[in-house]
Image (tube, grey):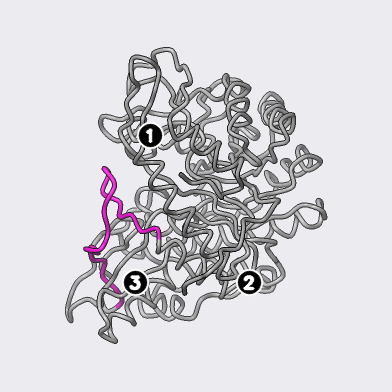
Amino acid sequence: MLHKTLKPFPQDFLWGASTSAYQVEGASLTNGKGPSVQDVKTPPAGTSGFEVAADQYHHYKEDVALMAEMGFKTYRFSISWARLLPEGTGRVNDEGVQYYSDLIDECLKYDIQPLVTMYHFDLPAALDEKGGWANRATVDAFVEFSELMFKSYGDRVKYWLTINEQNMMTLAAGAILGIDTSAPGATKNIYEQNHHMLLAQAKAMNLCHEMLPEAKIGPAPNIALVYPASCKPEDVTAAANFNALRNWLYLDMAVYGIYNNIVWSWLEEQDALPENILDGDMDLMASAKPDFIAFNYYSTATVKMPDEGAEGTKGDQQRGATLAGFSQAVSNPNFQKTEFGWEIDPIGFRNTLREVYSRYHLPIIITENGLGAYDTLEEDGAVHDPYRIEYLRKHIEQMNLAISDGVEMMGYCPWSAVDLISTHEGIVKRYGFIYVNRDEFDLKDLKRYRKDSFFWYKKVIASNGTDLA
């Protein structure tokens, strides 16, 4: 659709950026914090762990001041479960509670709205030792954690996100949930854990509305439209299949409280239907109503119908694997790729926004979107990242077109506010507007530097999205 005149971004549009606790904070096993699954795992070879990260725990005032200089309207960050509840339940770490209270107050000092992610890949190790999300008791522990957050910060936090990228945890269960995906019954195990997370999310949304009637809460999956590799009808079917498995399963449940029928049928075929759905679960999930949809967007996927007799294979979490008789990921020749091999599809961003809004008719906030790259700090303190500016410019242009298409947008928070530790590539894969002076194993001075994208994004925010030059 071509527009003669573009609609403006809303006047109260929430421009900002995102981080997550374990990737940015540091102080990982100090100040009363218990270990999370991220603290006890072995990092990929050649990458650093999360002991120090970007050390935002000790630099939060400086970082928030830089965000304010950019003009942020919101800052999306996560709260470490193990920093508040070191064993995941029971004993409260008062120092951890105070840290996030201070961070929230620092944001509000500059009129930056905190956008709080309740869970971002960092289950307390003590709960993981008891079975993690496979243990239904973890649902109750998450409700306890939620209640503590709502009591501690609900007087100041208006916007809450439940679980970050639950679909990626499920699709990449080996890497994130630690499941042996080749073991007998692995698929059933994965989707039983998924059911517990869906149940935890629903309970948290209901509790938020009960305790904080003025607050707003929503899910935060990673959503990206799936294209058919050709106009062959079977490839169109494959795209519908993987769209359901990758995207709609999670949003159908969050918004409507129902399991997507295509996914349910696929699980039935795999003899992997979750058997842990108890009486009352479905009614509870149908009662939970999000106020908005948040989602992370990086790149679309393209699939074809696998050849007859093709066996399943592992794939990457963004694009998917080969699932016999269901879908098979293929490379799309129409896209450039980042230095780390991710396809770049700004128009797909608009396509995804349109599809999500037409299915669910809820306001949308983007909670991740960005370009990981090898940035270089020059001798004069400059960091030139025109590639990041170009990436973000094209995506913001497409978001503006989606608004003109009638999509109700409430905010945009690229990944990431400051450089942080990427889960698989370490510090060398930099996303931030703010450069953190450290290498993989040399912490240097952790000094902050403004990248060129810092000044560009400041101009974008000041113009409310009209000046993208």
Q: CA distance from mark 3 to mark 1?
A: 28 Å
Q: Magenta segment, which residues?
A: 326-346
Q: Quadrant of residue 334?
A: bottom left
On the image, the x and y values in percent for residue 65 come to 62, 25
Local SS, label 2: loop
Residue appearing at x 36%, y 59% in the figure: 345
Q: Quadrant of residue 280?
A: bottom right
Q: CA distance from mark 2 to mark 3?
A: 22 Å
Q: Which mark is residue 430?
A: 1
Residue appearing at x 41%, y 53% in the figure: 298
Q: Which residue is mark 2?
A: 361
Q: Which mark is residue 227?
A: 3
Quick one: label 3 or label 1, which is nearer the N terminus?
3
Q: CA distance from mark 1 to mark 2?
A: 34 Å
- Amino acid residing under circle 1: Arg
- Amino acid residing under circle 3: Tyr
Q: How many marks?
A: 3
Q: Quadrant of residue 171?
A: bottom left
On the image, the x and y values in percent for residue 363 come to 64, 63
On the image, the x and y values in percent for residue 450 come to 47, 25
Q: Residue furthest bottom?
A: 233
Task: Determine whether label 3 and label 1 are within 8 Å by CB.
Answer: no
- Amino acid residing under circle 2: His
Q: How dense is the environment of label 2, judged by Cα within 10 Å: few (below 14), some, or many (20 and up)?
A: some
Question: Is residue 334 on the magenta stretch?
Answer: yes
Quick one: label 2 or label 3, which is nearer the N terminus?
3
On the image, the x and y values in percent for residue 243 come to 41, 71
Local SS, label 3: strand
